[in-house]
Amino acid sequence: MTSELPIGPSIMLLLPLLPGIYFLANILMQKACGACEDIALFSPGVSLTLWLFFTHAFSLLLKNFALGLVASTVFLSFVGYFIFLQKKSSLKIFSSLPRAFMCAWILCVLFLVPSIFFWDFHDKMGSYSSHFSTTSQILNNIYPPRDFCFPDKLLNYHYGINTLFAMVTVLTRIPLDISIDIVTLFLWGYFLLLLASFGKKMFGEKAAIPCMILSAFVSGFPWVAGKNTSITYMLLGFYQIGNTDINPPLCSYFFQHPWTIGSPLAILIFLLLKIYEEKQIKNSFFCILLCLFCSTLSFSNMTLFLSLTATVGIYYFYKLFLDKKDYSHKFFIFLTLVIVIGFAYFLSGFSNSIFHAQEMENFKIGFALGGIAGDFESNILWNLASFGFVLPLGIIGLFFLPSMKEIFLILALGGIFISNNLRYASSWDIVKFATLAQLALSFPMAALLIRICKIPLGKLLSLCLGFFAIAWGISFHTVFFLSLPNNVYAESFRNSSIAKSVTQEEVAAISWLRKNISAGEIVLSEYKNSLAYIYLGGFPQLWIDSITQAYGFSQKLLERRHFFMKNFVSDYDLYKKENVRWVIADRNNSGKISSLVEMWKEKKYIEQKASFGTIGVYCFVQ
């Protein structure tokens, strides 16, 4: 059951303009890389990144998502069509792919279809500020999105993927939960293609399939924990070592949706740098593409943005002194990354928690005094379980990489160091740097396995080592593929009690309010209905959940809200000070909120704005 979109269907008139963005991306790639066989593969990623970046930028500027989407689409498509028709450029659409590769790619894509379409990971719908609710708020034409408990403050999160979900939803009119799945499936398939292309460029034609599978399913070896548990938990690798859970495999992070967009962007950056080294590109278009990818990462995936921007910056700063040739262009690459940092300041997203730290006193990064798992022995075991075979194989493989070894070395060592020695004050998410290190080590691991293949019985040994390096990634999604019981990661919005408990009258009330709510306003409802109203309406709530403190809000703010959750006070002014503007209540319900509504109506503190059966939508009198 879904509510009506506040943005009307007339926006679908933008659909015929979308090919113009693809034309622009195709031309930009040809300008940057010349005659390159990867242009057809690059162009979808470049066009998607262009569209997302400019929609985000225009929406921030205009403080309106719909206007931002219209402005970016019209602007980009006009430029694309104009240049394409003026210069009559050739369009690179297809690139030939071997049949064996296509079969392997299709199998890898289909393997994750049950995980994508039949189950919802916790990031999609596990909290007030989930990806479902954040996208719903953007679809209310509120941009940038606000925090769901303190909507007077911007959402300190990397919500670029939510902007993309909203763009697809509003243009196709597909229900939000399904459009999230469709975008996830597309980006998973595209991610696999990019991995294969990078493997081919690094190690040759025969490495495309192995590199795609190794990097996509790279994972640790959790079974070194050696604990007896159920078959489902064993396949999921759901173990704890010391005081910390083992870090899940990369292919599970793809469902923590900043990684859905961040993973393909990271490989696009790797491919761009590889092409630059191969072809010795010396033009400004290369810097434009690098700036575009990194800037989009800044509001889409903060872990990858910080790591890749810093790593590439350090690498080319080092190259300035090591290699005196092509000094000016390396300097411009370094300068581009400095400019990207400036862009991040204005592009909002997670940057708010870094550049705008008002009342974010609990958002702190400090040293983990006992290490990631609490003590020396547990730390060693945690790393063995979380990295598995990729750790020794990847480190040795760095010596066999044909190029870019410094970049992967910095990413791997940096990710391992950060995840083991630092921690967020109220979040486990520092382990995401370990995931990046795992991805970075997967490429040198592939280089080593390719080298092993050349020795006697090497192919068999390489196959065994490769299997153990991806075994957890495969077993993890096998649980979803077979729908095994007791899956702690799996939920289903379409079959959840939240979706089934909402009545048609409530959906109608939500649809009405979505067209009338403004940024910063809180909707008061019964606590048991709060999640449904957040998911289906994107409405900020007076109540708070356990995830809220991970955003770093001060203890004073959190305690003030806990007061409301424990005491249903009737003081009208207190609610107004908390930015409560709207109330949804059922007059046949005997709950606390319904009682407050009746009292406030008598005192004329609120007035009814709409009615749907027994459901009333009320507004506080200003």
Image (cartoon, rainbow, N blue to C red):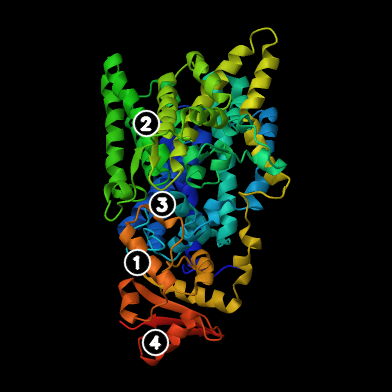
Give the amino acid type for the residue marked by disc 3 in the picture: Ala
Label 1 crowd (10 A; few <14 / some 14-19 / many >=20): few
Label 4 crowd (10 A; few <14 / some 14-19 / many >=20): some
Mark pair 4, 3: CA separation: 34 Å
Question: Could you tell me if the residues under marks 2 and 3 are in contact, i.e. CB atoms within 8 Å?
Answer: no
Mark pair 1, 3: CA separation: 17 Å
- Say which quadrant the N terminus sits in: bottom right
Rendering coords of residue 49 (x, y %): 44, 44
Asked if residue 311 lies left or right of residue 429, the reply is left
Query: Looking at the image, is 423 positioned above or below residue 574?
Result: above
Label 2 crowd (10 A; few <14 / some 14-19 / many >=20): many
Q: Which of the two marks, 2 or 3, is nearer to us in this view?
A: 3
Mark pair 2, 3: CA separation: 38 Å
Q: Report the residue marked by disc 2.
A: 286
Give the amino acid type for the residue marked by disc 2 in the picture: Phe
Q: Report the residue marked by disc 4.
A: 600
Q: Closest to the observer: 186 or 532?
A: 532
Taking the spot 52% from the left edge, 51% from the top edge, the residue there is 123
First in residue order: circle 1 vs circle 2: 2
First in residue order: circle 4 vs circle 1: 1
- Asked which secondary structure carries label 4, the reply is helix
- Say which quadrant the C terminus sits in: bottom left
